[in-house]
Image: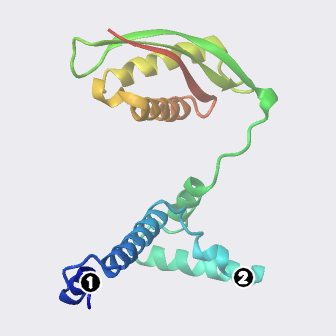
């Protein structure tokens, strides 16, 4: 005599373990795929292929360097000048002696933003600079404050909202002040930002 549970399994209407196994396998496959996608998306960039090649003898390097420069000049390119500029941009900055770095506060910066023009920002902070540079700290602080005013007048309030906005502001100010001070200003440090 067959029980009621056996008749349900034969008819295909019962629960069974097969749907549970299929669901488990699908969730594992989807999880592995999502994990792989995350790893591929956030993985650090691969090293350039040039670093993987074995070093060639110095004479071969000189000939190899001359050939692309000659080809670029013949093709109307920038030649060695363009290559030198590209390699300068790729090189990391030279290390700085910690004994040569000092801090000075900058005058508070109070100015309005580009949009909405009725909103005002007050930025307080300072700069780290190289003592061996040609400009004095008070001159650097004043020039940096002027550069910050000019930059803030070009941004929108939404550009500085949140953590990412503050990081972009910090990075932009660092880039601007370094380039305009010929590298004497190392960093702009923001100690306060008030929106009115």
For the residue pair 82 and 113, the one nearer the viewer reads as 113
Q: Earlier in the sequence, mark 2 or mark 1?
A: 1
What residue is pinned by disc 1?
A: 3
Residue at 42% over, 72% down: 28
The residue labelled by disc 2 is 54
User: Could you tell whether 154 is left or right of 162 in the image?
Assistant: left
Displayed quadrant of residue 65? bottom right
Q: Give the mark toward the camera: 2 or 1.
A: 1
Return the x and y of residue 20 as percentages of the image width and height.
35, 74
Tell whether 36 sits left or right of 62. Answer: left
Name the secondary structure under disc 2. loop
> How dense is the environment of label 2, judged by Cα within 10 Å: few (below 14), some, or many (20 and up)?
few
* Total numbered badges shown on the rendered structure: 2
Q: Are marks 2 and 1 in contact (CB under 8 Å)?
A: no
In the image, residue 121 lies at what x, y percent?
Answer: 36, 13
Residue at the image point whose x is 38% and y is 25% from the top = 151
State the image quarter where residue 64 is shown. Answer: bottom right
Relative to residue 154, is residue 184 drawn left or right? right
* Residue 105 sits above or below residue 159 on the image: above
Point out residue 136 in the picture as x, y percentages from the top left corner.
66, 16
Say above or below: 82 vs 2. above
């Amino acid at each position: 005599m067959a029980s009621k549970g056996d008749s349900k399994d034969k008819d295909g209407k019962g629960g069974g373990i097969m749907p549970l196994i299929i669901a488990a396998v699908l969730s594992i496959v989807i999880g592995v795929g999502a994990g792989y996608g995350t790893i591929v998306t956030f993985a650090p960039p691969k090293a350039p292929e040039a670093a993987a090649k074995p070093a060639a003898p110095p004479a071969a390097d000189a000939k190899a360097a001359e050939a692309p420069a000659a080809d670029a000049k013949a093709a109307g390119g920038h030649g060695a000048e363009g290559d030198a500029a590209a390699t300068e941009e790729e090189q990391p900055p030279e290390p700085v002696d910690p004994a040569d770095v000092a801090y000075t506060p900058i005058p508070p910066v109070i100015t309005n933003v580009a949009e909405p023009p009725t909103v005002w920002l007050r930025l307080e902070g300072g700069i780290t600079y190289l003592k061996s540079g040609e400009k004095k700290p008070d001159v650097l602080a004043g020039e940096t404050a002027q550069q910050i005013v000019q930059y803030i007048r070009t941004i929108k309030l939404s550009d500085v909202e949140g953590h990412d906005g503050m990081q972009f502001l910090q990075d932009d100010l660092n880039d601007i002040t370094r380039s305009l001070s010929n590298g004497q200003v190392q960093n702009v440090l923001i100690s306060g930002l008030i929106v009115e």
